[in-house]
Amino acid sequence: MLEYDILIVGAGGAGLYAALWASQNLNLKVAVMSKVYPVRSHTGAAEGGINAALGNVAEDSPEKHAFDTVKGSDYLADQDAVEIMTQMGPQIIYDIEHRGVPFSRLEDGRLAQRPFGGASFPRTCYAADRTGLAILHTLYDQTLKQGVEFLNEWFLLNVIHNGERVLGVTAWDIRNGGVHFIKAKAVILATGGHARMYWNRTSNALGNTGDGSAAVLRAGLPLKDMEFVQFHPTGLRKTGILITEGARGEGGYLINKDGERFMKKYAPEKMELAPRDIVARSIEREILEGRGCGPEGDYICLDLRHLGEEKLMERLPQTVEHARVYEGVDPVKEPIPIRPTAHYSMGGIDTDKYGQTEIKGLYAAGEAACISVHGANRLGGNSLLDILVFGKIAAEHAAEYVVGVEHLPTEGGEYVKKDEEFVNALMTGESKEKLADMRKELGNIMASKVGIFREEKPMVEALERIRELKERAKQGLRVVDTSKRFNLNLIQTLEFLNLLDLAEVTALCAIERKESRGAHYRLDYPERDDQNYLKHSVVRRKEDGTLEHSWKDVVITKWQPQERKY
């Protein structure tokens, strides 16, 4: 049996940064478990940058960063957590820069910062348009240097607790096959988001299936604000692959078929740099009202031609490459066809401002967690800051906690047996359903009925169909490949079952929130309703398998809700 003081599940930015800080205490046994090799983690897909008020603009400050974040969240963010994040921002930037992140710089040597959506000042530090990749590789190098142990290619099955304390997790060893119990005094879940539920049009990697969030739900613990899924305004038309907000931060235009910069109608001050929820809805409105580009009128154009080839290749080389490879257009000479793409999960595992859940020793950080610093809509550039700040905080809190407790006396045999029976059941019997078809069906349901624009009747239909899919999967979805080693059919099936659980929660929460706020826009309730819904939605699964929905107050410190204008 594997046994650790702190087990971190997930090897993206949150998990690796947590590992660095947890392992500062050399007396602690720390491990990182990941279903993919660490440098394949989704943090590498974050292109545009990371926010912090560094003082390049004298008028900027962490407090102004906090206000922009709260306003961008449509006042649903917990303001105490936001203030922690923005106050820690500068020290986090300098720490990772000193560890080796190759940030782009100004001529005088200071770190360069570009404008991003919803920000009062340019405060987004960047490494060209490969910021997340630079951070991910640097942190992985540093964790190896520090001697952190890695369990690569292990898949999280379940979080084990006794109702008061965490005991560890069960996991599937992908490389060799088999269920194992991993004993831990503390567990930090840094398993990323779940926008792959919008299978057919998302910027998310194939592995963004919310494994930690689904495990927490199965463990009877709460998820929070799951109705809030961000659609990034600029995904490539054909694939949904992300074109960074940095393209607009550097001065890119959004134009419709008439060549009009239409954002002047929707956000006259910020234009293309309004918050993502506003820009995404504006693009969809242009398309729905017949002003889309192309023969089918089904996309909008991102025009970068006026920036010139030299600037594009210096600041946005990956953007140029993506457009050329995946759309067959050269941004130096022609506009890029784009349309909104499911991108980021504001909701996730319910934690306090230290990343701690209601179970002692169980933490969450990064996109898997809902702390909540993003509320109803995340500002671009805040995600990389969030994962580092709260990865560090969760690790320090966990390290302090484990020093004062002993391992509980359990060998985990009963948990292993239960999961072995579940996996064996998936591998026996006739497969009546095709996994690929079911994934596509789920994606279509979510995109058409729980997408950018929402309404009661379609969402109720979506919830019913998701529950039908769950029943069909239970009765007829089987793993065709019955081998043990590197059984990707098994892993993909487990991931899909996680997505089904999280899609059900998302649809339920979207139905219950009868207002429009941030990324959650209801055609039948188009106004924000602070009197009834200035609250977090909370869902947990009861012992009979049904979902229980409730509400939780938002933490307000300084900024009372105002009308949100840009």
Image (tube, rainbow, N blue to C red):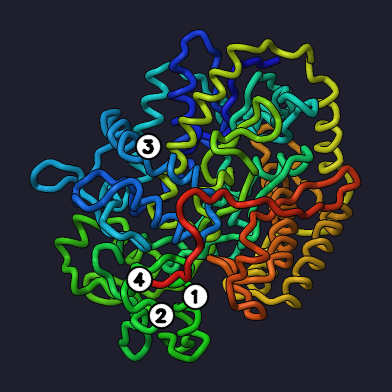
Q: Please give the name of the residue rendered at 37% of the width and 88% of the height, measured from the top-left corner.
A: 257
Q: In this rendering, which labeled residue sits more in front, label 4 or label 3?
A: 3
**Spatial distance from mark 4 to mark 3, Cα to Cα?**
42 Å
Q: Nearer the viewer, residue 62 or 14?
A: 62
Counting residues from the N terminus, which is met first, the one under dot 3 or under dot 2? 3
Counting residues from the N terminus, which is met first, the one under dot 2 or under dot 4? 2
Q: Please give the name of the residue rendered at 48% of the width and 36% of the height, measured from the top-left corner.
A: 390
Counting residues from the N terminus, which is met first, the one under dot 1 or under dot 4? 1
Tell me the crowding category of disc 1: few under 14, some 14 to 19, or many 20 or more residues within 10 angstroms, Cα based. Answer: many
What amino acid does circle 2 point to? Tyr
Relative to 277, residue 260 above or below: below
Q: Secondary structure at mark 3?
A: helix
Residue under label 4: 328
Q: Quadrant of residue 248?
A: bottom left
**Spatial distance from mark 1 to mark 4, Cα to Cα?**
26 Å
Do the numbered discs 2 and 1 sit on residues whose CB atoms are within 8 Å?
yes
What amino acid does circle 4 point to? Gly
Q: Quadrant of residue 88?
A: top left
Residue under label 3: 88
